[in-house]
Image: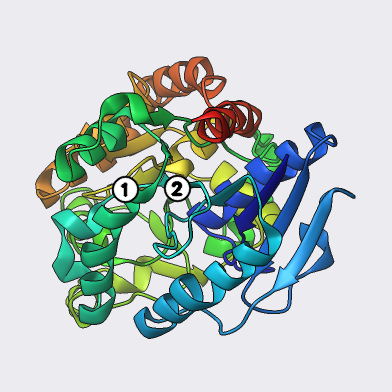
Amino acid sequence: MNIAINTRLLIQNKLEGIGWFTYESLKRITIQHPEHHFFFIFDREYDPEFLFSDNITPIIQFPQARHPVLYYAWFELTIPKLLEKLKPDLFLSPDGFLSLKTPVKSMAVFHDLNFEHYPQDIPFWTRRYYRQYFPKYAAKAVRIATVSEFSKNDIVQQYKVTPDKIDVVYDGAHDIYHPLPEDEREKVRKIYTQGLPYFIFIGSLHRRKNLINLFRAFDLFKKSNPSDVKLIIVGAKKWWTRDIDIAYNRMVFSDDVIFTGRLSVEELSRVLGAAIALTYVSYFEGFGIPIVEAFRSDVPVITSNVTSMPEIAGDAALFVDPFNPESIAEALYKAYQYESIREELIVRGRRRKDLFSWQQTADRLWESIEKAVKS
């Protein structure tokens, strides 16, 4: 079997949610299935580390697809010509984008439909492209994989896709995440906060990650609970908006917020492992990988009571209303003040962490691929 795969989000040192899904699942699938051949299609020079096994042929196709005009050029002009030449049994797209102009069987992974619910959070031309083309991709795909039951139900409702066409594969977390001994936690705190305790946020600094209300909540927490606690924000400011900037600059305790930028996986595992708690209070998520990373690190989780997050966190989190800073502030107080609550959340997180692994993701995605080829 020959499978062509859109791997344009495999970019060295720039992997985020969908990029990690692509990396972790394809690494396992290609190694575990040497009897099949895979064409990895990049839109730029690639790093050799992404060629996981000998049954992969890398192909570079320009232009770099990073703008709606270039999305169209790549997926509707370049990709159809390439697929006509390769004649694969399936075209797989881990980021959901398909080509409407190819007769090749196609399978998409839809991670979430945030742009349908919060279009204002995305630049105008990007959201226009997404909202025009993703319903067509849903119809085009012979099979769709997604990362939560929440997202599956959302795809069914938004695009009128029959549920039996969609497989839930879930995300996982890197094996590097593990509990840190106290002496290591102290070392990390000395590096980042001069030895002081801190909450942590991890993710792209996108508006839907709800930094505005997290900043407001942290201020409320500090006002009512005078302390030396810090807030570490891990992530690139690619999506930083004027609204987020205004909220940050209006903070009373902005000096207690520390921005690290993007961190390596190795360093991120250490910084997460030394935190009081993960503050992951997005108002829309298809999964929420940092939740599972925190479970693996024995770090309590504070997360939102909407979209996929209750499904992923189960009974192992303090749930908040992401639209209510007071609700978030109350959870910060509980996680900081009560050791018994932290310990209970850690125990519950240990029970949930094994429900999600990249090996399970790869196995479920492969089962979905086989269904797509046979359809």
Q: Residue at x 36, y 50 (%)?
A: 140
Pointer 1 with pointer 2, Cβ within 8 A: yes
In the displayed structure, does residue 268 sit left or right of residue 106? right
Q: Residue at x 42, y 64 (%)?
A: 204
Residue 218, given in percent of the width and then of the height, sits at: 25, 56
Decide: is 220 above or below 111: below
Residue 111, given in percent of the width and then of the height, sits at: 39, 47
Q: Amino acid at mark 2?
A: Ala
* Comes first in the chain, label 1 or label 2: 2
Q: Which quadrant holds residue 81?
A: bottom right
Q: Amino acid at mark 1?
A: Ala
Q: Which residue is mark 2?
A: 108
| Mark 2 residue crowding within 10 angstroms, few (<14) / some (14–19) / many (20+) | many
Which secondary structure, mark 1?
helix
In the displayed structure, does residue 173 sit left or right of residue 149? right
Q: From the image, which quarter does the N terminus lie in?
A: top right
Which numbered tag is attached to residue 239?
A: none
Residue 260, given in percent of the width and then of the height, sits at: 52, 69
Decide: is 90 above or below 260: above
